Image: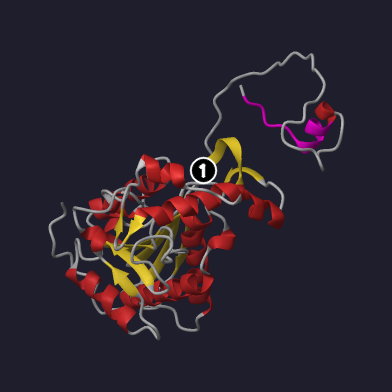
Amino acid sequence: MTLRITAAAAARLLGKPLAGLTPGTQGGAVRARLDYVEQAVPQYARNVVAVIRGSDPQLAGEYVAIGAHNDHVGFTATPVDHDSARAYATAENLARIVGDQLKDITPEQRAAIRVNLDSLRAARPVRRDSVANGADDDGSGSMAMLEIAEAMAKAPVKPRRSILFVWHTGEEAGLLGAGWFVEHPTVPRDSIVAQLNIDMIGRGAAGDLPGGGPDYLAVVGSSMLSTQLGKAVADVNARQPKPLRLDYQFDQPSQWPGYNNLYNRSDHVYYARAGIPIAFFFTGLHQDYHRVTDEPQYIDYPHYTRITRYIHDLALELANAAQRPLVDKPNS
């Protein structure tokens, strides 16, 4: 059994304040009886839904949906030193990048990885960390949605169609929030003309993945159901002050190790199953994926800002178009 206690309780058990204590410090013996009751409790995780109403009376009943997930993976079983863990993961990731491919490294390559702990300790003391904060996965998508919503809410002229924002819960537990929303939508399901999913758009540097760089953005599924949606994705990007380099390779059945079946691995898939055209934007898995080192200081904010502005402009393009994207592909 694991118990989580307050800092004050820990200081009382150890007999001294926690400040200055080193890992492994032992306290006195405790004799106690633990009384507890196990009972089922409601799960209070919720999707968060918001709408900006369209300005065109004929089109306001149609919706461009924008989505991201607001959950992550919780705690690790054992705290690790943040800096040394990230230095090792970065070295391991760089060893896996071979040209434009991501390769598995050999046991010999892994054994050869060395981390200069002296330089890390010279910069700062050990920082034990057990919380996976998910700054990129998917804090980046969730906060991009807030910025897009704020920009649209403050705009003097609203888009013709309505904009539906859904912060899905439970993505990491199996796309639970997206599955629930598509089965129990707050608007008529057939009124959703497209869904733009944003899951990890804060990274994408050359050291994160093959082909990465300051202009990198992967797009998944934009032409799977609708040729028109795929064209809008490309056309809006081409009109950006500095277009992004769109990577479509994840639409292919054969992908890098670790990326298999990416089209089915985020919230958009439930919308696609319902016949709603989707486009999924992300900047790639990286060395901090699902680790305690996925933190805000590693986000590439200028790159992130450009991607967010682009998705904002794409949503407006779809919301103001004369016709909704035509579904002209089989839903497989």
Tell me the quadrant of the picture where the N terminus can be found. top right
Q: Residue furthest right?
A: 16
Q: Is residue 119 left or right of residue 201?
A: right
Q: Does 21 sit above or below residue 181?
A: above
Task: Provide residue 179's location: percent of width, then percent of height.
Answer: 35, 45
Q: Secondary structure at mark 1?
A: loop
Task: Provide residue 187's location: percent of width, then percent of height.
Answer: 36, 57
Q: Nearer the viewer, residue 225 or 190?
A: 225
- Residue at 55%, 49% in the rendered image: 115
Q: Nearer the viewer, residue 31 or 106?
A: 106
Residue 44 location, quadrant? top right
Q: Does 321 sit above or below residue 254?
A: below
Task: Provide residue 262's location: percent of width, then percent of height.
Answer: 29, 52
Task: Provide residue 159's location: percent of width, then percent of height.
Answer: 40, 77
Q: Is residue 292 left or right of residue 313?
A: right
The three-letter code of the residue at mark 1 reads: Ala
On whether residue 179 falls in the magenta region, the answer is no
Q: Nearer the viewer, residue 153 or 295?
A: 295
Q: Read off the magenta span.
A: 2-11
Q: State how many labels appear.
A: 1
On whether residue 5 falls in the magenta region, the answer is yes
- Residue at 76%, 38% in the rendered image: 22
Question: Residue beneath label 1, please?
Answer: 45
- Residue at 41%, 66% in the rendered image: 206
